[in-house]
Amino acid sequence: MIHVDGTQLTLAEIVAASAADGPVAVTDAAMGRVSASQEFAEQAAAERPIYGLSTGVGANRSVALTDPDAQALDLLRSHATSAGSLRAPGRVRAMLLVRLNQLAAGNSGVHPAILTALVDMINRDALPAVRELGSIGTGDLSALAVTALALHESEPFARGDALPFLSSNAATIADAALALHDLRTLAQSTMVIAAASFDGVHGNPEAFSSAVEEITPFAGARTVCRTVRHLIESPREPARIQDPFGLRTLPQVHGALLDALDQLETVVLTMANTGSENPTLSPDHGVAHHGGFFAARLAQTLDLVKLASAQTAQLSLSRLTMLNEPALTGLEPFLGDGTPGASGTMVTEYVSTSALAELRALATPASLQTATLSRGVEEDASFASLAARQALDSVGFYRTVLSAELLAAIRCARQHDRTSGPIKAVLELCAALPTGMADRDLTTDLDLADSLVEALAALA
């Protein structure tokens, strides 16, 4: 059971909700805040104009509504306009939980019955059909309007419910949370796979020493050093005075990704646990028309994570190249079977480079974009929604890059006949990978490696 109170939603709960893993319920204290906000909104609306409650929206913000209750439904219908493919059920479920939690914070003015209906929608897994396009990082209007129309069938939306329900980036926050979870898992696996590559080329452990923790005094870099030291415990004599960058700069590059992911978690959970509807309708703070819906920080942090992911993936390709180099492994070129001219794992470099190119394209900062809409009164946008979708899309390509390195690292370990030491656990988890070394189509091998990558995170 996920107990929603508007202030303590966790990343694990968002991920669990995406998988429909258990029911949800709103706490009594949260429902009390929602009721108080709704009563305050009704009182305030009788005393002054309030955006979206007694007026139109966007460029119609100064237009008084003639029939607010009837026009609430018109607002939902118009704002449900969208395009693109349908979002996967897991993304929609995560969005619904985030929106429920934000409403439970008690700043929106919506009727408590709306939350009750939303809880019922989540628990019945009666998902709305949410399409991909319609958000620009200033509120996921289309996605939430479609959701509101689905809820309206069981719980009618009145004048104080429509705009407040739409005024949220819940879909973007949910996407960011799911991307964060998957990328963090891959980041853990990266260190394990890199340690396997280290073993294959008889790397120099000095790059991960306590001295490096002192000269790169960031939390992520220190985590990389300590994790890799644990994974390569009691290494053999290094084969060279210093390794190529793929190993030697792992603390500095991969550590930056770990730090960026931690920063993203802070931003995602802060936003998921805040009711930032415009206007805020709070008995404690009054009425406030504001720009809290503008998700600039989320967009910028997602862009940082995407850039950091692409950079650490570049090192994975570097390590794959190292594993294919006989001068570094002491084995046949491309880890071939000894047949003159054998290609071995040669083409995995091409696959990895292709996936890396996709990662780099997705890392293009979404937050550099802008827009001018609604007759010029909304003259900017964060495009956090695009950044979150890019981050989600990057997961598969990052995993492909790691799969290619893993495949080569396992083949290298087998050719070195590693049966003990730190590499043993990796070999055991990857025992299903084919053992044959003769040239063949490695597509199936890569697919299998892809399915094993995330399981390696447990070894970090």
Image (cartoon, grey):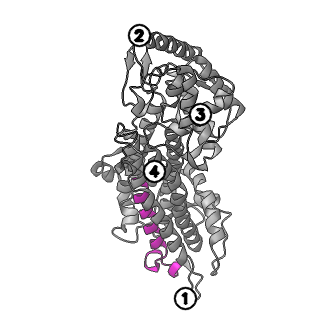
Closer to the chain start, of discs 1 and 4, is 4
Q: How far apart are marks 1 and 2 (CA)?
A: 84 Å
The three-letter code of the residue at mark 4 reads Thr
Q: How far apart are marks 2 and 3 (CA)?
A: 33 Å
Q: Which of marks 4 and 3 is in front?
A: 3
The three-letter code of the residue at mark 1 reads Gly
Closer to the chain start, of discs 4 and 3, is 3
Residue 25's place in the image compared with 315, above or below, is above
Closer to the chain start, of discs 1 and 2, is 2
Label 3 sits on residue: 96
User: Among all residues in the image, which is located at the extreme left?
Assistant: 215
Q: Residue at x 55, y 14 (%)?
A: 29
Q: Given contact means CB atoms under 8 Å apart, are the residues at marks 2 and 3 in contact?
A: no
Q: Distance between the residues labelled 4 and 2?
A: 61 Å
Label 2 sits on residue: 47
Label 1 sits on residue: 341
